[in-house]
Amino acid sequence: MNASPDLKPISNLLRLLAKDYFIFAPQKIGEIIKVAEIKSASDIDWSGQMPENPWKEIFLPPCERIFDLSGGIKESKKQYPKIAAVGMNVLDLKALALFDQVFGSDTYYRRRRNNTLIVGYSADWPIDYKKFKVFSHTYEEDILEHLSFDVFLAKLKNGKLKIYSGSEKGQNILEASGSKDYKHIEFAGPIQEKGVDKRVLKLQGVVWQSANNKIWDELGKICLACGKCSIVCPTCFCFDFKDNSDPNNNCRQRCWGNCFYNDFSLVAGGNKELDTIKKKIFFWYVHKFVRIPQEYGLPGCVSCNRCTHTCPVGIDIAKNIRRILKGNK
Ligand code: SF4
Ligand code: SF4
Protein backbone atom coordinates (compact mmCIF):
# COMPACT_ATOMS: atom_id res chain seq x y z
CA MET A 1 0.00 0.00 0.00
CA ASN A 2 1.23 3.54 -0.78
CA ALA A 3 2.36 5.72 2.11
CA SER A 4 0.60 9.06 2.63
CA PRO A 5 2.08 12.01 0.78
CA ASP A 6 3.82 14.87 2.52
CA LEU A 7 0.73 16.99 3.27
CA LYS A 8 2.56 20.07 4.58
CA PRO A 9 2.24 22.07 1.33
CA ILE A 10 -1.54 21.58 1.33
CA SER A 11 -2.29 21.81 5.07
CA ASN A 12 -3.66 25.37 4.64
CA LEU A 13 -5.70 24.27 1.66
CA LEU A 14 -7.26 21.44 3.67
CA ARG A 15 -8.03 23.86 6.51
CA LEU A 16 -9.71 26.28 4.09
CA LEU A 17 -11.77 23.49 2.57
CA ALA A 18 -12.89 22.27 5.99
CA LYS A 19 -14.07 25.80 6.80
CA ASP A 20 -16.13 26.43 3.66
CA TYR A 21 -17.08 23.03 2.23
CA PHE A 22 -18.55 19.68 3.09
CA ILE A 23 -15.62 17.44 2.21
CA PHE A 24 -16.15 14.11 0.50
CA ALA A 25 -13.10 11.90 0.10
CA PRO A 26 -11.99 8.27 0.03
CA GLN A 27 -12.08 6.96 3.58
CA LYS A 28 -11.08 3.57 4.99
CA ILE A 29 -14.11 2.05 6.69
CA GLY A 30 -13.10 -1.34 8.07
CA GLU A 31 -11.32 -3.04 5.19
CA ILE A 32 -13.16 -1.05 2.55
CA ILE A 33 -12.27 2.26 0.91
CA LYS A 34 -15.43 4.30 0.34
CA VAL A 35 -16.16 7.80 -0.85
CA ALA A 36 -17.90 9.45 2.11
CA GLU A 37 -18.23 12.75 3.89
CA ILE A 38 -15.27 13.17 6.22
CA LYS A 39 -15.19 14.89 9.59
CA SER A 40 -11.49 15.72 9.55
CA ALA A 41 -8.70 15.83 6.94
CA SER A 42 -6.99 13.03 8.86
CA ASP A 43 -9.84 10.71 7.76
CA ILE A 44 -8.78 10.94 4.11
CA ASP A 45 -7.32 7.76 2.65
CA TRP A 46 -4.40 8.72 0.40
CA SER A 47 -3.52 5.16 -0.66
CA GLY A 48 -4.86 5.75 -4.17
CA GLN A 49 -6.91 2.52 -4.10
CA MET A 50 -10.10 2.63 -6.14
CA PRO A 51 -12.99 3.42 -3.76
CA GLU A 52 -15.73 0.82 -3.82
CA ASN A 53 -18.49 3.34 -4.59
CA PRO A 54 -18.41 5.99 -7.31
CA TRP A 55 -18.51 9.76 -6.81
CA LYS A 56 -21.60 10.23 -8.96
CA GLU A 57 -24.02 10.67 -6.02
CA ILE A 58 -22.46 14.06 -5.39
CA PHE A 59 -23.38 15.25 -8.86
CA LEU A 60 -26.47 13.15 -9.55
CA PRO A 61 -28.27 12.04 -6.38
CA PRO A 62 -29.95 8.61 -6.53
CA CYS A 63 -33.31 10.42 -6.30
CA GLU A 64 -33.78 14.15 -6.72
CA ARG A 65 -37.00 16.12 -6.40
CA ILE A 66 -37.21 18.34 -9.45
CA PHE A 67 -40.81 19.60 -9.63
CA ASP A 68 -43.47 20.34 -7.03
CA LEU A 69 -46.79 19.37 -8.58
CA SER A 70 -49.25 20.75 -6.02
CA GLY A 71 -51.11 23.75 -7.49
CA GLY A 72 -49.31 23.64 -10.87
CA ILE A 73 -45.83 22.66 -11.94
CA LYS A 74 -43.11 24.52 -10.05
CA GLU A 75 -39.40 23.92 -9.91
CA SER A 76 -38.47 22.50 -6.51
CA LYS A 77 -36.43 25.06 -4.61
CA LYS A 78 -33.46 23.71 -2.74
CA GLN A 79 -30.11 24.62 -1.33
CA TYR A 80 -27.06 23.26 -3.11
CA PRO A 81 -24.34 22.62 -0.53
CA LYS A 82 -20.74 23.60 -1.24
CA ILE A 83 -18.91 20.31 -1.61
CA ALA A 84 -15.21 19.61 -2.03
CA ALA A 85 -14.59 16.27 -3.75
CA VAL A 86 -11.06 15.53 -2.57
CA GLY A 87 -9.04 12.66 -4.00
CA MET A 88 -10.76 11.86 -7.29
CA ASN A 89 -8.40 9.70 -9.33
CA VAL A 90 -7.84 10.09 -13.08
CA LEU A 91 -10.37 7.41 -14.03
CA ASP A 92 -13.06 8.99 -11.87
CA LEU A 93 -12.23 12.37 -13.37
CA LYS A 94 -12.65 10.79 -16.80
CA ALA A 95 -16.09 9.58 -15.74
CA LEU A 96 -16.89 13.09 -14.54
CA ALA A 97 -15.88 14.43 -17.97
CA LEU A 98 -18.57 12.21 -19.46
CA PHE A 99 -21.17 13.38 -16.93
CA ASP A 100 -20.28 16.98 -17.82
CA GLN A 101 -21.07 16.20 -21.47
CA VAL A 102 -24.28 14.31 -20.75
CA PHE A 103 -25.71 16.75 -18.19
CA GLY A 104 -23.92 19.90 -19.34
CA SER A 105 -27.15 21.78 -19.99
CA ASP A 106 -29.12 20.26 -17.12
CA THR A 107 -29.97 22.97 -14.57
CA TYR A 108 -29.91 20.70 -11.54
CA TYR A 109 -26.61 19.11 -12.48
CA ARG A 110 -24.98 22.43 -13.34
CA ARG A 111 -25.95 24.00 -10.03
CA ARG A 112 -24.54 21.09 -8.09
CA ARG A 113 -21.42 20.92 -10.27
CA ASN A 114 -20.78 24.66 -9.94
CA ASN A 115 -20.95 24.34 -6.16
CA THR A 116 -18.41 21.54 -6.12
CA LEU A 117 -14.67 21.98 -5.94
CA ILE A 118 -12.79 19.09 -7.50
CA VAL A 119 -9.43 18.11 -6.04
CA GLY A 120 -7.96 15.29 -8.09
CA TYR A 121 -5.24 13.02 -6.75
CA SER A 122 -2.72 10.53 -8.00
CA ALA A 123 -0.97 8.37 -5.40
CA ASP A 124 1.89 7.49 -7.74
CA TRP A 125 2.14 9.99 -10.52
CA PRO A 126 2.06 9.25 -13.41
CA ILE A 127 2.32 5.51 -13.00
CA ASP A 128 -0.87 4.71 -11.12
CA TYR A 129 -2.95 5.51 -14.20
CA LYS A 130 -1.19 2.56 -15.85
CA LYS A 131 -1.53 0.43 -12.71
CA PHE A 132 -5.31 0.63 -12.92
CA LYS A 133 -5.08 -1.82 -15.86
CA VAL A 134 -6.98 0.33 -18.29
CA PHE A 135 -8.67 -1.78 -20.96
CA SER A 136 -11.25 0.60 -22.38
CA HIS A 137 -9.06 3.37 -23.79
CA THR A 138 -5.44 4.15 -24.59
CA TYR A 139 -3.04 5.57 -22.04
CA GLU A 140 -2.89 9.36 -22.49
CA GLU A 141 0.40 11.09 -21.67
CA ASP A 142 -1.34 14.45 -21.49
CA ILE A 143 -4.37 13.25 -19.58
CA LEU A 144 -4.48 16.21 -17.17
CA GLU A 145 -5.20 18.59 -20.05
CA HIS A 146 -8.35 16.64 -20.83
CA LEU A 147 -9.75 16.33 -17.33
CA SER A 148 -11.87 18.92 -15.61
CA PHE A 149 -10.59 19.63 -12.08
CA ASP A 150 -9.90 22.66 -9.93
CA VAL A 151 -6.81 21.36 -8.17
CA PHE A 152 -4.81 18.20 -8.86
CA LEU A 153 -2.34 16.71 -6.41
CA ALA A 154 0.23 14.38 -7.91
CA LYS A 155 2.28 12.39 -5.42
CA LEU A 156 5.78 11.77 -6.71
CA LYS A 157 8.12 8.88 -5.87
CA ASN A 158 9.73 10.85 -3.01
CA GLY A 159 6.33 11.44 -1.37
CA LYS A 160 6.23 15.13 -2.32
CA LEU A 161 3.12 16.56 -3.92
CA LYS A 162 3.23 18.30 -7.25
CA ILE A 163 0.31 20.72 -7.30
CA TYR A 164 -1.66 21.74 -10.37
CA SER A 165 -4.55 24.13 -10.83
CA GLY A 166 -7.04 23.43 -13.57
CA SER A 167 -9.46 26.35 -13.26
CA GLU A 168 -9.76 29.89 -11.98
CA LYS A 169 -11.59 28.51 -8.95
CA GLY A 170 -8.63 26.22 -8.31
CA GLN A 171 -6.13 29.05 -8.73
CA ASN A 172 -8.13 31.24 -6.34
CA ILE A 173 -8.28 28.68 -3.59
CA LEU A 174 -4.60 27.81 -3.96
CA GLU A 175 -3.68 31.50 -3.77
CA ALA A 176 -5.99 31.98 -0.77
CA SER A 177 -4.26 29.08 0.98
CA GLY A 178 -0.88 30.72 0.38
CA SER A 179 0.28 28.13 -2.12
CA LYS A 180 2.56 29.63 -4.77
CA ASP A 181 4.29 26.53 -6.00
CA TYR A 182 1.76 25.17 -8.45
CA LYS A 183 1.44 24.84 -12.21
CA HIS A 184 -1.66 25.83 -14.13
CA ILE A 185 -3.04 23.45 -16.73
CA GLU A 186 -5.47 24.82 -19.27
CA PHE A 187 -8.42 22.49 -19.87
CA ALA A 188 -8.31 21.50 -23.56
CA GLY A 189 -11.70 19.74 -23.64
CA PRO A 190 -12.42 16.11 -22.81
CA ILE A 191 -11.34 14.72 -26.21
CA GLN A 192 -7.70 14.62 -27.28
CA GLU A 193 -6.63 16.95 -30.11
CA LYS A 194 -6.01 13.98 -32.43
CA GLY A 195 -9.68 12.96 -32.06
CA VAL A 196 -11.56 10.08 -30.52
CA ASP A 197 -9.25 7.52 -28.96
CA LYS A 198 -8.32 4.61 -31.29
CA ARG A 199 -9.01 1.91 -28.70
CA VAL A 200 -12.47 3.40 -28.05
CA LEU A 201 -13.18 3.34 -31.80
CA LYS A 202 -11.98 -0.24 -32.11
CA LEU A 203 -14.15 -1.45 -29.23
CA GLN A 204 -17.11 0.44 -30.64
CA GLY A 205 -16.97 -1.63 -33.84
CA VAL A 206 -16.15 -4.94 -32.20
CA VAL A 207 -18.84 -4.80 -29.50
CA TRP A 208 -21.46 -3.72 -32.05
CA GLN A 209 -20.56 -6.70 -34.25
CA SER A 210 -20.66 -9.14 -31.35
CA ALA A 211 -24.44 -9.67 -31.15
CA ASN A 212 -24.06 -13.32 -32.20
CA ASN A 213 -21.08 -14.04 -29.97
CA LYS A 214 -21.92 -16.92 -27.65
CA ILE A 215 -20.57 -14.91 -24.72
CA TRP A 216 -23.96 -13.21 -24.42
CA ASP A 217 -25.76 -16.57 -24.01
CA GLU A 218 -23.26 -17.56 -21.35
CA LEU A 219 -23.49 -14.28 -19.45
CA GLY A 220 -27.29 -14.34 -19.79
CA LYS A 221 -27.30 -17.66 -17.94
CA ILE A 222 -25.10 -16.59 -15.01
CA CYS A 223 -25.99 -12.90 -14.51
CA LEU A 224 -28.54 -12.42 -11.72
CA ALA A 225 -29.76 -9.05 -13.06
CA CYS A 226 -29.16 -7.66 -9.58
CA GLY A 227 -28.03 -4.31 -11.06
CA LYS A 228 -25.14 -3.85 -8.59
CA CYS A 229 -22.69 -3.28 -11.44
CA SER A 230 -24.71 -0.34 -12.71
CA ILE A 231 -25.10 1.19 -9.25
CA VAL A 232 -21.33 1.26 -8.66
CA CYS A 233 -20.44 2.28 -12.21
CA PRO A 234 -19.23 5.91 -12.35
CA THR A 235 -20.46 6.30 -15.93
CA CYS A 236 -23.96 4.78 -15.64
CA PHE A 237 -26.26 7.77 -15.89
CA CYS A 238 -29.65 6.44 -17.01
CA PHE A 239 -32.54 7.80 -14.99
CA ASP A 240 -36.28 7.54 -14.66
CA PHE A 241 -38.97 9.94 -13.49
CA LYS A 242 -41.14 8.98 -10.57
CA ASP A 243 -44.28 10.92 -9.73
CA ASN A 244 -45.51 10.99 -6.17
CA SER A 245 -49.26 11.52 -6.18
CA ASP A 246 -49.62 11.97 -2.41
CA PRO A 247 -51.58 15.29 -2.19
CA ASN A 248 -49.32 16.42 0.69
CA ASN A 249 -46.16 15.68 -1.22
CA ASN A 250 -47.11 15.84 -4.87
CA CYS A 251 -43.85 15.95 -6.79
CA ARG A 252 -41.78 14.59 -9.65
CA GLN A 253 -38.44 13.01 -8.87
CA ARG A 254 -35.56 12.03 -11.08
CA CYS A 255 -34.11 8.73 -9.87
CA TRP A 256 -31.28 6.53 -11.12
CA GLY A 257 -32.44 3.95 -13.62
CA ASN A 258 -30.88 0.55 -13.98
CA CYS A 259 -31.03 -1.45 -17.20
CA PHE A 260 -31.00 -4.69 -15.22
CA TYR A 261 -34.23 -3.89 -13.42
CA ASN A 262 -37.57 -5.17 -14.64
CA ASP A 263 -39.24 -1.85 -15.38
CA PHE A 264 -36.30 -0.38 -17.31
CA SER A 265 -37.57 -0.74 -20.88
CA LEU A 266 -41.24 -1.09 -20.03
CA VAL A 267 -43.48 0.91 -22.36
CA ALA A 268 -47.22 1.53 -22.61
CA GLY A 269 -49.12 -1.70 -23.15
CA GLY A 270 -46.64 -3.69 -21.03
CA ASN A 271 -44.10 -4.32 -23.81
CA LYS A 272 -40.45 -4.55 -22.86
CA GLU A 273 -37.52 -4.41 -25.25
CA LEU A 274 -35.11 -5.89 -22.70
CA ASP A 275 -37.13 -8.96 -21.76
CA THR A 276 -34.25 -11.41 -21.15
CA ILE A 277 -31.09 -11.14 -19.07
CA LYS A 278 -29.03 -11.84 -22.18
CA LYS A 279 -30.54 -8.76 -23.86
CA LYS A 280 -30.00 -6.64 -20.74
CA ILE A 281 -26.32 -7.43 -20.42
CA PHE A 282 -25.70 -6.99 -24.15
CA PHE A 283 -27.52 -3.66 -24.00
CA TRP A 284 -25.30 -2.60 -21.06
CA TYR A 285 -22.14 -3.25 -23.08
CA VAL A 286 -23.55 -1.66 -26.23
CA HIS A 287 -24.48 1.49 -24.32
CA LYS A 288 -21.00 1.77 -22.83
CA PHE A 289 -18.84 0.73 -25.77
CA VAL A 290 -20.94 1.75 -28.78
CA ARG A 291 -23.59 4.37 -28.11
CA ILE A 292 -21.79 6.62 -25.61
CA PRO A 293 -18.64 6.89 -27.78
CA GLN A 294 -20.84 7.55 -30.83
CA GLU A 295 -22.74 10.31 -29.10
CA TYR A 296 -20.04 11.95 -26.98
CA GLY A 297 -16.71 10.80 -28.45
CA LEU A 298 -15.72 9.53 -25.00
CA PRO A 299 -15.42 6.03 -23.54
CA GLY A 300 -18.58 4.88 -21.77
CA CYS A 301 -16.39 2.74 -19.53
CA VAL A 302 -13.33 4.16 -17.80
CA SER A 303 -11.85 0.80 -16.64
CA CYS A 304 -12.34 1.37 -12.91
CA ASN A 305 -13.27 -2.33 -12.48
CA ARG A 306 -15.83 -1.54 -9.78
CA CYS A 307 -18.44 -3.63 -11.61
CA THR A 308 -16.11 -6.65 -11.59
CA HIS A 309 -15.33 -6.31 -7.89
CA THR A 310 -18.98 -5.96 -6.92
CA CYS A 311 -20.50 -8.65 -9.15
CA PRO A 312 -21.76 -11.52 -6.96
CA VAL A 313 -21.17 -14.08 -9.72
CA GLY A 314 -17.74 -12.89 -10.81
CA ILE A 315 -18.55 -11.36 -14.19
CA ASP A 316 -15.32 -9.62 -15.20
CA ILE A 317 -15.71 -6.83 -17.73
CA ALA A 318 -12.03 -6.68 -18.76
CA LYS A 319 -11.97 -10.44 -19.40
CA ASN A 320 -15.20 -10.21 -21.40
CA ILE A 321 -13.86 -7.42 -23.55
CA ARG A 322 -10.70 -9.43 -24.24
CA ARG A 323 -12.90 -12.37 -25.26
CA ILE A 324 -15.14 -10.26 -27.50
CA LEU A 325 -12.02 -8.88 -29.19
CA LYS A 326 -10.95 -12.44 -30.01
CA GLY A 327 -14.25 -13.18 -31.78
CA ASN A 328 -16.64 -16.08 -31.20
CA LYS A 329 -14.35 -18.29 -29.10
S1 SF4 B 1 -23.51 -7.29 -10.83
FE1 SF4 B 1 -23.12 -9.16 -11.99
S2 SF4 B 1 -24.92 -10.43 -11.61
FE2 SF4 B 1 -25.48 -8.34 -11.00
S3 SF4 B 1 -26.43 -7.48 -12.85
FE3 SF4 B 1 -24.26 -6.91 -12.90
S4 SF4 B 1 -23.31 -8.52 -14.16
FE4 SF4 B 1 -25.32 -9.31 -13.50
S1 SF4 C 1 -15.13 -0.93 -15.38
FE1 SF4 C 1 -17.30 -1.37 -14.96
S2 SF4 C 1 -17.86 0.05 -13.32
FE2 SF4 C 1 -15.95 0.83 -14.20
S3 SF4 C 1 -16.59 2.28 -15.77
FE3 SF4 C 1 -16.34 0.30 -16.78
S4 SF4 C 1 -18.39 -0.59 -16.76
FE4 SF4 C 1 -18.40 1.06 -15.24
Image (cartoon, rainbow, N blue to C red):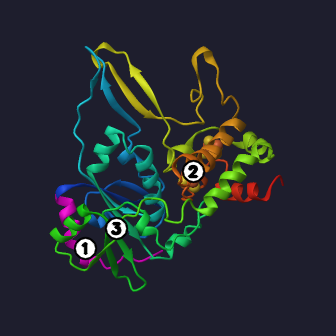
Which amino acid is tagged 1? Ile
Residue 33 seen anywhere in this rendered image of the structure: no
Point out the image quarter for the C terminus.
Answer: bottom right
- Residue sitting at 60 percent across and 36 percent down? 260
Q: Which residue reaches farthest right?
A: 329
Circle 3 residue: 186
Closer to the camera, 238 or 317? Answer: 238
Residue 2 part of the magenta segment: yes
- Residue sitting at 47 percent across and 54 percent down? 95
Q: Please report whichever mark, 1 or 2, sits nearer to the chain's N-terminal start.
A: 1
Residue 310 lies, in percent from the top left, at 57, 51
- Circle 2 sits in a helix, a strand or a loop, which is it? helix
Quarter of the image for residue 60 reads top left
- Circle 1 sits in a helix, a strand or a loop, which is it? helix
- Residue sitting at 61 percent across and 58 percent down? 200
Residue 112 part of the magenta segment: no
Circle 2 residue: 293
Residues drawn in magenta: 1-19
Which amino acid is tagged 3? Glu
